Image (cartoon, rainbow, N blue to C red):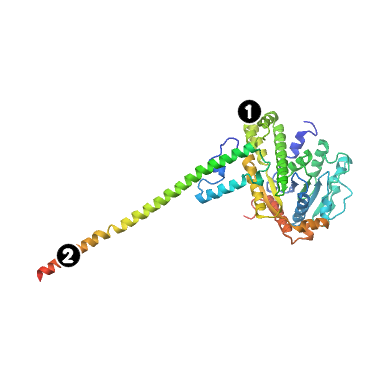
Amino acid sequence: VKRYGLNNVVELTRPRPRPDELPAGRRARRIIAVGGGKGGIGKSLVSANLGIALARAGHRVTLVDVDLGGANLHTCLGINQPQGTLSDVVTKGTRIDSLATPTGIENLSLVSGAMDALDAANPRAQARVRLVEQLQTLDADYLVLDLGAGTSLHTIDFFLLADHGVLVLLPEPTSVENAYRFLKAALFRRLQQTAQSLGVAPLAEAALGSQGSAMRTPAEVVKAVAESNPDAAAQLERSLRDFRVKLVVNQVRSPADHGVGRAVVAAWKKFFGLDMDYLGAIAYDDSAWQTVRKRRPLLVDAKESPAASHLTAVADALAALDRPRHAGR
Amino acid sequence: MTATEEPTLYDVLEVDPASSLDELRAAVDRARETFGTESLAVYALVDEDQLGELRARLDAAAEVLLTRARRCRRSSRGHTRARRASRSRTRTRPTTPRRRTTSRRRARRGSRRSRSR
């Protein structure tokens, strides 16, 4: 195995145990990655306000701006561009915890991702693995990663690294199209990584490529692998089952828009056989763009607005996933 | 995600096999809305052939299950009507001969009285 090869990323992005499954005394840290494929759909708005809502609920939260080509999470939070950024981790070997900047909100810090190094938006595999390793050393209850647009490998790998991959989309064809492109790229990457670690990559590749342009479903790939290697197929199936994305529909205007979230969950399950959790919808709200213009977070400047209460509900829904299963019984 | 099992007609419509006719109708409407040509949820998810194949499977499942459920409802209604009819028959049967007996007795009593006079 090469030091910074694919298998390292496989190891690092392996699903981690739930907090209640961890041995007593170990920190129950969770990583949330907010992506969506398309630019301008509110990923940074969701990330920043999700971080604020979780921090207000008493969790220690670090927001990390991994939109390496266009980092601007600091602007959403109303703070100046921090001096140290993620590029220092790659170029100077700076420890990531020294880059965490207070945001003025209790329990919430920010690691800025504005990278000025050449080719920063698309770092090499070695830099990616180093960033992933460093991220996991951050001491916080929640890390919230704000991903960039597109389907570049580093964006997908950060999404797969997370315990909760949050997909943001708008009820518009362009956004839905890019969201599916992003989802399929992430699923394909997970499949490739797992198949490679199990030594069945050629079988999986053959199954994937045997249907022309239409993507094979995970079940079909697992079935094809099972014909030659049932044990590997069972592990592959388990790994793909863990690919359980959390959906947020932003800028909802009409009752029909409200239905898009549940319909996307149903369509994804129908064609790909995988579960997706619908965390909720966020209403289209003038407060959102108004607070962005003022460089003030929505949950701080317009906390009574409908969008703010919807964002808080999304954060509650996410946090509920991490509550011990026996709690509340 | 199951690699081996073939979906049943109930799986295709995502309903419980014990669903009522109304529940089935709601599931069919929901599926037609989710996977219809106007649906945003299937835009760019899969190609047109895959969508067409799914719509055909949904239509086939809807036809079979709705027909079966309507038949069940009809037969259960028929069964209910038959049960009501049989209940009403069992109620009237014992009363009719009793009346006849009573009227015969009255007739006999009448004839006895007229004879004694």
Residue A107: quadrant of the picture:
bottom right
Q: Which residue is mark 1?
A: A228
| Percent position of residue B42, x then y | 65, 43
Instruction: Looking at the picture, tell me which residue is in the foreground, A208 or B2.
Output: A208
Give the residue furthest to the left. Answer: B116
Q: Are marks 1 and 2 on the same chain?
A: no
Instruction: Looking at the picture, tell me which residue is in the foreground, B86 or A27.
Output: B86
| Percent position of residue A117, x then y | 88, 41
Q: Residues within 10 Å of mark 1 (few under 14, many from 20)?
A: few
Q: Quick one: quadrant of the N terminus of chain B?
A: top right
**Residue type pointed to by label 1:** Ser
Please give left or right for residue B86 compared with residue A187 in the image: left
| Percent position of residue A310, x then y | 71, 56
As drawn, the label of residue B107 is 2
Badge 1 sits on which subunit?
A
Q: Residues within 10 Å of mark 2 (few under 14, many from 20)?
A: few
Residue A304: quadrant of the picture:
bottom right
**Residue that appears at 69% across and 36% down:** A191
**Residue type pointed to by label 2:** Ala
Badge 2 sits on which subunit?
B
**Does dot 1 land on a helix, a strand or a loop?**
helix
Instruction: Looking at the picture, tell me which residue is in the foreground, B44 or A274.
Output: B44
Please give left or right for residue B54 compared with residue A13 in the image: left
Between the residue at mark 1 and the residue at mark 2, the CA separation in whole angstroms equals: 96 Å
Q: Nearer the viewer, mark 1 or mark 2?
A: 2
Residue A6: quadrant of the picture:
top right
